[in-house]
Image (cartoon, coloured by chain):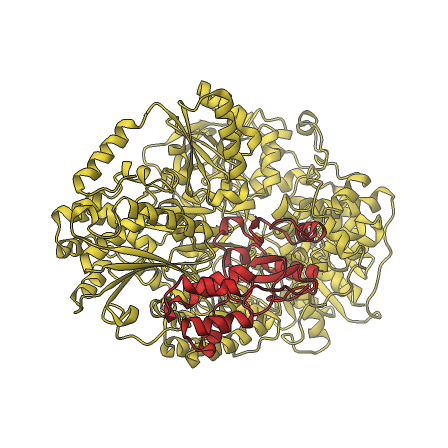
Amino acid sequence: MKQVHDFSKVEEIIQGYGKEEASLIPVLQEVQGLFGYLPKEALVKISKGLKVPLSRIYGVVTFYSQFYLTQRGKHTVRVCRGTACHVRGGKSVLNVVKDSLGIDDGDTTTDFQFSLETVACLGTCFLAPVMMVDRTYYGKLVAQKVPAILHQYKRKGGQGE
Amino acid sequence: MNRLSSLAELEKLREALRQGANAEKTCVRICMTGCRAYGAEEVRDAFRAEVRVRGLEERVEIRETGCHGFCARAPVIVIDPLDIFYQQLSAQDVPAIMDETILKGKVLERLVYSHPLTGERIARISQIPFYRGQTQIVLRNCGKIDPRSVEQYIIRDGYAALARVLSSLKPNDVIEEIKTSGLRGRGGAGFPTGLKWSFAKASPGNTKYLICNADEGDPGAFMDRAVLEGDPHSVIEGMLIAAYAIGAKAGYVYVRAEYPIAVEHLKIAVAQARTAGLLGKDILGSNFNFDLNIKEGAGAFVCGEETALIASIEGRRGTPRPRPPFPAQSGLWGKPTNINNVETYANIAPIILKGAGWYSSLGTESSKGTKIFSLAGRINNTGLVEVPIGVPLHEIIFNVGGGIPKGRRFKAVQMGGPSGGCVPMNHLNLPIDYGSLESIGAIMGSGGMVVMDQNTCMVDVARFFLSFTQDESCGKCVPCRLGTKRMLEIVTRITRGEGMEGDIDLLQEMGQSIKDSSLCGLGQTSPNPVLSTIRHFREEYESHIRHKHCPAGVCEELVFAPCENTCPVRCDAVGYTSLISAGRYDEALDLIRLNMPLAGICGRVCNHPCEKVCKRGDIDDPVAISSLKRFAADWEIKRGALASPTFLERPKDERVAVVGCGPAGLNVAYYLGRRGYRVTIFEALPVPGGMLAVGIPRFRLPINVIEHDIRFICQHNVEINTGKVLGKDFTIEDLFKQGYKAVFLGLGAHLDQKLGISGEDAHGVLKGVEFLRQVNLGQKVDIGEKVAIIGGGNVAIDTARTIMRLGAKEVTIVYRRTREEMPANIDEIEEAEDEKIKILYLLSPTKIIVEKGRIKGIECQRMKLGDYDASGRARPVPIQGSEFVLEVDNVVSAIGYTPDLSWLPEDDKLVRNRDGTLVVDPLTMATNMPGVFAGGDLVTGPSTIVEAMGSGYRAAISIEKHLKGRDLHKDRLYEPLRRAPMMFTKEEAEAAGSGEPRNHMPSLTIESRISSFSEVNLGFDEETAVKEAKRCLRCDLQRRSE
């Protein structure tokens, strides 16, 4: 389901910052907080508001892994690919997540229920191997436990927000 | 809080806060950062509710703190002033803690820390090795104060260093003090901090910036996160002092967005500091101005590089630029800028307060102070530890870190993340400092220590890091962008079994070029993990390339299942387990016997390396693979059946002679017999089986089981001649003359090693292997009432248990190391302990005391553990003057055994090693005599049954090639004869991941055990076997490449 956006709020966000390049990343972060991703219309407004060329904004947005140009799923599954997770079997966890959701790293399910991301390190190595669904950590995973965890987000839909 | 407008007001406030603090008050400190993921919030809520219900608000404080470091035991709490540490709590534990501990001062044993190796329970936090081994400077407040309370920081000398600087030190004095302290940057490169500050100070200009690099991105490092979450003011204070020293008025903290709690606490701290007049204009009335901004990163590893970080703050793509100019000359917006890491700043205040002399008294000559390490990976005590620089690695891994879980072996530790390298087992004594690590190809880096055990594949680790750097390369310079990609392709090819000769050299050459020519630290260090793993684990690369075998059982394209992969004879454990789970026991036995003809024997006495790698062990305990094999074998024996022989090839005329009827020889005979060759085994002893028959007591391995397995083998064109001694009854030449086309030597190692102490030759001193042989062959051996056995292997334990059964009253095993290092199987050690055999550890015999031709006793010396040897075990060191006498009637030496080569004529051509073993080609097992092959203990020295069978398997392949006139080295890749049918679906296999704990075989009662030689373990019944088999996670179904 496609979202309908109210872009007037983008203007408000821009107002809160100085009209300079240094404000670009914080503005992008705040705007993405609003929509969950960065719609083109918003980027155009930011470009005008901060007087930064759209091409340069595009460069920044595609450089940092945190920014998205397309709509994301309701739930974000982040699988840690850090070293500690890796030596404790993180790869098989990732494989099972991919299989269960039927999507690859960086993709979103067609029903916009899930997006899958890998993270270099969540900094929770004591939980390894670990994944996060939205803000909830699932630690000390084994591949076989993963489908059940994901299933509760599939069925109940709204949980974990 | 009101604004503090002078230094005196700060001190007044501190005094007032201290007056107000009630030392009597019980304080429950709950970690609310790392432990949150384990339910710390529920624990906190439960404490609050309990305190409220009981009206104890005045007596008990519930304090939310940062990380206590001991993440492995989360959620954790500490109760002051009782000094009690409770771990792995849940909300249900809280009422009992209130009733018993807080109100009555009683310790709840079940919540107390227990040592992972010794099981010792320790309640007081100051006594736990994890904490006792630490020196906390940076972590001084972490876990002790509420990070959201500036008051609690101030009570503990917070901002006192700032006050000292503002009141009595000039900027140059501050820089000198930091220089003298020897502090080096903790972000990774280790540049001297004081020197860096002096550069920024010396740069011309009025506008200067200060940056805190909190973009902690190295996978495996989380100390900056803990400091920011647990003690943000310590970083702010350090930055204030640095700003004063270099003359900066504005600063930035660039923090990873993946650390939401760190950002939150930092924001709170900055706001508090502003309100209190500790940030902003005219700080503490001193005319010093400084303010801080927080910048959240947007997810780019390269932004940890200082010039990339600056670009990111400026709102651009975070790509690095060449240096010089360094940020100290031209940094943020072209102005002089000083960048340090979180941990570096957190060190500043203590140095100023306690002095450079105090700080530099810690650490080594070139590396001063302490360093935080984050312990992760395959180690018991995952978490954060702060130790003086220069402590040996083994101290961190085994004492503070608690060792390796599941009884597995330490292999290496990866230091410095993707820029670093690994430190292997033979460097456990290495003092950890900047220089020593560089000397072996690793780096200190940010202090991430990812511990790896025997189940970690080093090629896979290298591939992992390369794929990381390749992903995170910003793409600006060619060597890093393309070089890492090409290297990744090569390493990936190797892990897929498509490696080629020359790949290793190519990787080294490319790695060196990338190091030499990349623009920034990310690129320059990116080849390190590959170069370092090649340096220390080259043989693993070679195994992937040449044998298409991943020794650790990780690389999924090469590994069918870890259990099968690790078995020296590639017995398909996952396959037969699955068949047993479906009630198809005969088929299970057939599958076992494809590669492993000694099913009943190995089901009982194999050391089962498969169970050490079983994935189920990561959840609870490994599947009882060995006992399941025994079940399948017993199923046949119990029905009085014997499977008919299966031949893989038509009968042939060539005959092969096998000398020695132990596990190696039997496996050679079986392999060749099934391929149509006629095999004769010559055995010196009156019974077949070698060590199986004479080295293992009957209560572990009954004779009928040996006979059954050998009967099965003999159906395959195999004939056994016992009582035929090589060198006495016949020679190798004779065999060829008699028409045998090839000879396999598998004579084993049956000669006991000498103790090398006085009194050893006295009457009553027995030899372990010889003794077991005599008992097994039915000979009578005189044994006194008190017997000491020297040694720690299976022979020592078997001897002790046999002697117990022969009627001795007191049987003592004397071993010079500790239980953890004992080479004997753990099951056997436990069974011996059950049978009341005393095992004395850290004890070494010095002489046997003989009086009037009779043994009086044995003099022993106590040992302590010292340095680590190349095998990764601590070396026992004698304690002088600790000698004492153990009174015994007999002494048995069981410290090892060697092959007996006395049958070889002096002028024989066969080449032998200095230790008495034969020299063979390690791949083909060929000796230097054409047509003569060898295997088993004769070649390896004392080893396991299944290793002996494995070497026999390799020799048999060579013999077949020899007979067919083919190249012995070519086409040797392992290919399974058959796989088990897919018994159940992947979903069903996934469901097996829960439930049922490991099943144990029933056994005889202790009393009936020690009064006879009946078999101790009784085997699974059918129902238990099926239940146990269903615990298998079916790793074979998890593979993606089929």
In red, which chain?
Answer: A
Residue closer to the observer: B1015 or A138:
A138
* Colour chain B is painted in: yellow
User: x, y percentage for residue B871?
Assistant: 46, 53
User: x, y percentage for residue B783?
Assistant: 58, 30
Residue closer to the observer: B331 or B630:
B331
Can you see residue A104? Answer: yes
Q: Does residue B196 sit above or below B783 in this rendering? A: below
Question: Residue pushed farthest bottom?
Answer: B478
Identified at 55% across, 72% down, the residue is A40
User: x, y percentage for residue A113?
Assistant: 67, 59
Can you see residue B358? Answer: no
Identified at 23% across, 64% down, the residue is B208
User: x, y percentage for residue B2?
Assistant: 27, 39
The quadrant of the rendering that contains the C terminus of chain B is bottom right
Question: Residue pushed farthest front?
Answer: A8
- In the rendered image, which quarter is residue B941 located in? bottom right
Q: Does residue B235 sit above or below B863 in this rendering? A: below
- In the rendered image, which quarter is residue B27 located in? top left
Say whether residue B143 is left or right of residue B337.
right
Residue closer to the observer: B542 or A9:
A9
The quadrant of the rendering that contains the N terminus of chain B is top left
